[in-house]
Amino acid sequence: MKTATLLALLLVPLVLVAVLPAGADEGCVITPTGIDCSAAGSTTSGGTTPGGYTPGLPLRYLATTERAGAGGLCWFWSPYPPGLDAWNANNDQAILLTLWALPECPDPEAPTVTLSTEWVVARAWEIFRSFPLGAPRPSLQPPDHGITGLPSYLSAPAPSRLSYQETLPDGRSLAVEAAVTAAVVDWGDGSPAMGHDPAALLPYPAGTALHTYRLKTCPPAYRAEHPSGPNCHPALEAYPVQATFRWTARYRLGGSWADLGYLDRSTVVAYDVDEVAGVLRP
């Protein structure tokens, strides 16, 4: 509450008392929760504090503030100063004048402003980034070592769809969903990365993510000294196989869904590849 506003209310000319509404009985008394104008003691004006009432604390002070929904100054009861202390009989007249001259403040939680589309999209992205977007957990077949000339398979279980819903400050409901819509496998030997349906990253023989290596991988000493060294990859001791899930998100404000964007999550595993060579025996 602005100090100038409170002083102005306290200095209202006494002539205003003459124009109090007819329903303002001279027998009205101030109570800790409002103004009691009935012999039975029923409360005719209680109000609530902007921001919510704190249980256990009496609404003792009548305060004023500016709120858009009230068109300017309005009053509310508060358990905290500053304000007109309703337990002090000297404030009775000022309290009655305030209640008569000004409207009660509207619910502070009621929506007064519609949030911009940019704000909503930014909030949807914030939610999307907070999701536990899982990276692939790839398994390779053969499991320990690949074999040149024999297809290797990569499998990875697809995660479930993620969703979240909340009420925005302007009262609208925002929903955000994210799901894995694509999977990409890079076999690490310089061949092009390939896209796959996440549901098709299955083990042998049903999976679609398979690749045949031409060169085995070897330690530097083996590559330099062993007679089969020329059959090794010139630099790698293992192929860096990378699997990527593409998480795509969408959002809506009670209507149709709108695309939000995507985030990638990747896992790299080292995959050793050997060769099987026939040997002549006497």
Image (tube, helix red, strand yellow):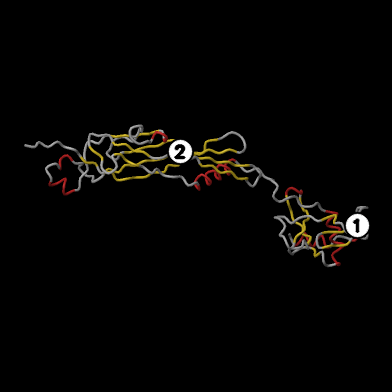
Mark 2 neighbour density, 10 Å: few (under 14) some (14–19) many (20 or more): many
Side of 80 relative to 188 (left or right): right
Mark 1 neighbour density, 10 Å: few (under 14) some (14–19) many (20 or more): few
**Residue at image coords 37%, 36%:** 202
- Mark linked to residue 79: none
- Does dot 1 land on a helix, a strand or a loop? loop
Identify whether 17 is placed above or below 188.
below
Side of 122 relative to 6 (left or right): left
Side of 215 relative to 251 (left or right): left
Q: Which residue is mark 1?
A: 38
- Identified by mark 2, the residue type is Val
Q: Quadrant of the C terminus?
A: top left
- Identified by mark 1, the residue type is Ser
Identify whether 32 is placed above or below 240.
below
First in sequence, mark 2 or 1: give its number.
1
Total marks shown come to 2
**Residue at image coords 64%, 42%:** 172
x, y percentage for residue 76?
77, 56
x, y percentage for residue 61?
78, 62
Quarter of the image for residue 41 reads: bottom right
Quarter of the image for residue 20 reads: bottom right
**Residue at image coords 85%, 59%:** 35
Identify whether 225 is placed above or below 55.
above
Mark 2 to mark 1 CA distance (whole Å): 66 Å
x, y percentage for residue 215?
21, 38
**Residue at image coords 42%, 42%:** 264
Side of 83 relative to 148 (left or right): right
- Mark linked to residue 180: 2
Identify whether 227 is placed above or below 19.
above
